[in-house]
Amino acid sequence: MAHIVILGAGYAGLRAALDLDTLLASQTSLARVTLIDRNPYHQLVQLLHQTAAEAIAPNESIVTLRRVLRGRPRVALHQGEVRAI
């Protein structure tokens, strides 16, 4: 069984995890996907200026990874920090 590990849940890592989940759902693949990030949330960078200007609350510029990955059974989330490869 293939095991795909994605380091970081920034925009590219999160998109890769979501796309792989969709791809694997349409196949009879036995691959596993693990997404690793040090934070339990994804920072919406494009909203940080609004947070700094106090136009929105700080929690409005983040989205929890569990929420994004809800309904994506092929993607496992692991919160941690990668120290070596």
Image (cartoon, rainbow, N blue to C red):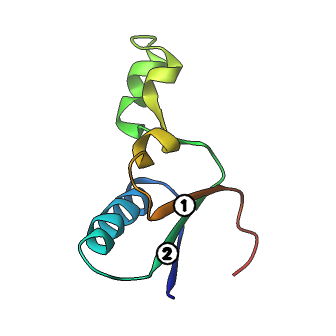
Q: How many other residues sit within 10 Å of disc 1, few (<14), some (14-19) or many (≥20)?
A: some
Residue 37 visible at all: yes
Determine whether, in the image, residue 61 is placed left or right of residue 82: left
> Residue at the spot x=76%, y=70% of the render?
83
Q: Position of residue 31 (x, y in %)?
A: 45, 80
- Observer able to see residue 42: no
**Relative height, residue 50 to residue 22 (above, below):** above
Question: Mark 2 is on which residue type?
Answer: Arg
Q: Give the x, y percent position of residue 17.
A: 40, 63
Q: Residue furthest bottom?
A: 1
Please state which of residues 6 and 72 is positioned toward the viewer in this rendering: 72
Q: Residues within 10 Å of mark 2 (few under 14, many from 20)?
A: some
Q: Point out which mark residue 76 bears.
A: 1
- Secondary element type, mark 2: strand
40, above or below 54, in the image: below
Q: Which residue is mark 2?
A: 32
